[in-house]
Image (cartoon, rainbow, N blue to C red):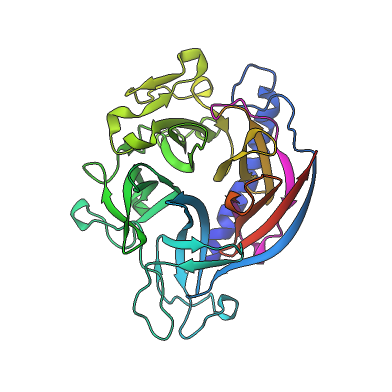
Amino acid sequence: MLRRFHILLLACLWAAAVLADYAKQQRGAGDPTQPVGTNPIVKFETVYLGQQNANNSCSHRDLGFTGELQGKWYALFGDTLWCAEPLTDPSKDNTSEFHGMVRDSLSLTTNDPLVVVDLHLNDDSPVRHQKQFVPFNASWGEDNTYGFGGTSIFETANGAGGIFYLVNANDAGLKGAGIAKIELVSGVPTVTKRFGVSGYWWPSPSTPRYGDVAAFRDPRSEYVYAWGGAPTSITDTTDAQYVYLLRVKAADAYELSKYEYWWGEAAGGWKTGRPLTEFGVRNAVMWFVGQGQFVWSAFWGVYVFVHLGPGSGDVLLRTATSLEGPWTPDVKVYTATPIDGGLTYAGVAHPYLDASGKTLTISFTNNNHIEVIKVTFSK
C-alpha cells in the first residue's frame, strides 16, 4: 500500500509541474475555469489542532466529508482499515499488517473536531469496527472489494437525504457516478436505495464523475450541487483535469429527469434533462483541483471552496459569489507535512462549529490520518 502511495505522489508532483505551466498560459485567455478578481481572504491565523479519531472504535481512514441531516452533522469516510484487536488507539497499530476494512464508513461529528462517533458498527470484540455504509449489490456484479467513493451527504425532503458516490471496480476501472437515498433507521442514517439499473446514473466513460470532487446542499437555494471530474475516456493530460457541474432541487434528487447540467455560460448555462455531451474549457467550471468541500461564509458573504493543491499539501481557499463561478485565486492557509512520505488530500469543512463564519475548522487526509486545523479570519 505504501508503494502505491509513493507512485501516486510522484505522479501528482509531475502533473502539478506540467499543468501549472498550462494554467499560466490560460490566464487572460478567456478561460472561465481560471481565477479572476481578488480573494477577500487576506488576514487570517491558522492553528494546528491535532488528529481526528473515533471515541468508540479504532481504524485508519481517509476523506471524512461532512454533511447535515435533520439537524445533525455526519462525516463520510473512504477506505476504512480496521486496527488490530484490542487496540483503541490507532497510533499503536502496526499498519504493515491487514486486519480487515470497508470501502466507506459513516460517523457522527461532535463539538470537538478531533472526535467522531462511529456508526454502523459490527460485533467484533472487544472493539467493534465499522460496517460498509454504501452497500455493494452482488446482482450488479459487485462484491466487497468495490469502492463507493462519496463526498458529503445532504438533506433532500421529508427527513430523508442522499449521497453521490463513484462506483470503483478496482482493476476493471470506474463504472459510474450514482446517488443513493438515505433514511434514518433507528435514528441512524442508512442507505435504503441505490438508483440506476446497475447502481449508477452517469457512466464514467461518457459522463463526468459527478460528486467525486464535491457535493453541496446550498443553504441559500433549493438546490444540491455536485462537481465531477472528466469522463474516463478523456486521456489528454490537460483535458482530463476539467471539472463539471450539475444541480437538482433537493426535493427532486431521486428523479433523474429533473437534473440540470451546466453547459457553460457561452453554451446557454443550465439545461434541464440534457446531460453534458461536450467536454472542454467552455463547459467546465474548474480545472486541476483536488477533492474538497463548499461552504457559504456569512463572514465574507461569499461561497468558499476548501481543497488541497494536488501533490502540494497546501490547504487552499477560493471564493465566489455564485457556485457556477468564476472563482478567485486560491489563498494558502496551511501546508501539511506528509506523514511517512504519503499523500495529503481532501479538504473538508466543518462549518457547524461556527455559524458566524469568523472561524473555519478544516480537516484533511495525511496518509490515512485525519488532521485538523482552525483558521480565524479578520478584515
Residue in view at x 66 percent, y 45 percent: 356
Q: Is residue 317 above or below residue 337?
A: above
Query: Which residue is at 48% across, 50% downward?
Result: 67
Position of 68 relative to 129 (above/below): above
Boundaries of the magenta span: 323-349
Could you say where residue 363 lies in the image, as x and y percent from the top left? 61, 56
> Toward the viewer: 117 or 280?
117
Residue nearer the viewer, 217 or 267:
217
Q: Residue at x 46, y 69 (%)?
A: 81
Image side of residue 102 versus residue 59, left or right: left
> Across the whole image, how many numbered discs are drawn on residues?
0
Image position, residue 125 (x, y; %): 39, 85
**As drawn, 70 above or below 368:** above
Q: Residue 186 in the image: x percent, y percent?
A: 31, 64
**Which quadrant: the C terminus?**
top right
* Location of residue 373 (image quadrant): bottom right
Taking 376 as reference, is 213 left or right? Answer: left
Q: Is residue 337 magenta?
A: yes
For residue 98: magenta? no
* Residue 56 coordinates in the image, percent (x, y): 48, 75
